[in-house]
């Protein structure tokens, strides 16, 4: 292990981890209890992506994970206000409506675009977990204290050093620094990081100069050498998402998984792109027909009234609006209209079990 793994009060020691790997909390069904428990039982930190999960289902999933491992694991929630999670106040873009009509896709939007964060958070207080992590925003210091009283460690997500400082100031136990290379949704909330997103190593370097808090590095990490590199740059743990998507225990649909493996075998381009077109919030995924066909609408960002018919509604409203398209694409086994979230290291994915992946990574790390 490197020196950072043995610092006093380090996350490795606090959580009794034996390898410096955090499995990223990917929402949407990717992180099954079986995947999470396999990571934790190996000695890493498995994570449940629960931002889109109903509170009663979240309770059940927590119990399922607890039945499969007695090791630490994390639950991740998306920080949304009650207004954000309950309100549809934007029109569906005309080009999306036209797509649904052209393909005879029935659209029945839910009454609310997202789950209630307050109700999800209450589950963490009533059914405590070892680690709670948060993305898309920041919680209050009172909420941090409430989790600490339950024995839960708190991890924030940041795309900018000032976001990391905000988490440190309210007493978080660690911050996950997510570089521009990372797949899936960007976890920060400040406008500073959106126009000129920072690469992971630059982000770690700049953050280390203003905060003294354990850092978890995320973004393009695919090998044991990558883990050592981010530790040298100031992180203690490495968070990996894309590498776990093609494991046997991953819960993503078969079409999505095959497209990732096609990249690894050269059958599909490894090109990824940050886009708001699926959800209204920046996220990185493989470039497909949907992103190419509707790319011109990226410029119409959240409630830009200059072209109200083409404006991209904010997250989570657009996310709810594109869900029927993604469901249709899944049924049709059509990857060109699925959100194929993936990081810039996607070409290195393999079809293997979690145990095989972890063994390989730690062999490279120790080697």
Image (cartoon, rainbow, N blue to C red):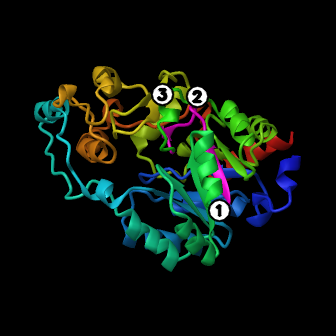
Residue 127 belongs to the span the image colors magenta: no
Q: Position of residue 117 (x, y in %)?
A: 40, 63
Q: How many marks do you count on the picture? A: 3
Name the N-terminal-most of marks 3 and 2. Answer: 3
**Residue interval drawn in magenta:** 173-187
Q: Which residue is mark 2?
A: 347
Q: Quadrant of residue 361?
A: top right
Q: Nearer the viewer, mark 3 or mark 2?
A: 3
Q: Label 3, secondary structure: give it.
A: helix
Q: Residue at 51% across / 45% down in the picture?
A: 187
Count neighbours of disc 2 (C-alpha within 10 A) and say few if under 14, some if 14 to 19, many if 20 or more. many
Comparing 188 with 292, the one in front is: 188
Q: Label 1, secondary structure: give it.
A: loop
Q: Residue at 75% across / 50% down in the picture?
A: 212
Q: Which residue is mark 3?
A: 195
Q: Quadrant of residue 133?
A: bottom right
Q: Which residue is mark 1?
A: 171
Comparing 301 with 71, the one in front is: 301
């Amino acid at each position: 292990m490197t020196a950072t793994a043995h610092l006093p009060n380090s996350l490795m020691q606090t959580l009794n981890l034996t390898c410096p790997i955090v499995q990223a909390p990917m929402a949407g069904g990717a992180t099954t209890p079986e995947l999470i428990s396999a990571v934790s039982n190996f000695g890493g930190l498995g994570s449940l992506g629960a931002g889109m999960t109903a509170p009663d289902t979240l309770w059940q999933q927590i119990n399922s994970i607890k039945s499969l491992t007695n090791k630490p694991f994390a639950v991740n929630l998306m920080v949304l206000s009650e207004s954000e999670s309950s309100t549809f106040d934007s029109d569906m873009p005309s080009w999306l409506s036209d797509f649904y009509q052209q393909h005879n896709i029935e659209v029945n939007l839910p009454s609310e675009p997202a789950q209630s964060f307050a109700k999800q958070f209450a589950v963490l207080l009533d059914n405590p977990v070892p680690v709670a992590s948060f993305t898309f925003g920041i919680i209050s210091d009172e909420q941090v204290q409430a989790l600490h009283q339950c024995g839960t460690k708190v991890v924030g997500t940041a795309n900018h050093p000032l976001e990391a400082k905000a988490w440190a100031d309210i007493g978080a136990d660690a911050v996950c620094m997510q570089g521009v290379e990372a797949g899936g949704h960007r976890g920060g909330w400040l406008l500073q990081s959106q126009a000129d997103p920072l690469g992971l190593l630059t982000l770690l370097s700049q953050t280390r100069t203003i905060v003294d808090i354990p850092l978890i590095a995320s973004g393009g990490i695919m090998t044991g050498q990558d883990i050592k590199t981010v530790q040298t740059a100031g992180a203690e743990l490495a968070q990996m998402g894309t590498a776990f998507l093609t494991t046997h225990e991953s819960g993503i649909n078969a079409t999505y998984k095959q497209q990732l493996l096609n990249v690894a075998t050269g059958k599909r381009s490894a090109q990824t792109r940050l886009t708001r077109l699926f959800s209204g919030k920046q996220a990185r995924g493989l470039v497909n027909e949907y992103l190419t066909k509707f790319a011109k609408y990226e410029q119409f960002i959240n409630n830009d009234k200059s072209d109200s018919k083409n404006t991209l509604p904010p997250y989570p409203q657009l996310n709810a609006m594109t869900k029927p398209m993604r469901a249709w694409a899944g049924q049709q086994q059509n990857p060109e209209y699925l959100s194929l979230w993936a990081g810039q290291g996607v070409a290195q994915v393999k079809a293997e079990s979690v145990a095989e992946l972890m063994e390989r990574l730690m062999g490279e790390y120790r080697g």
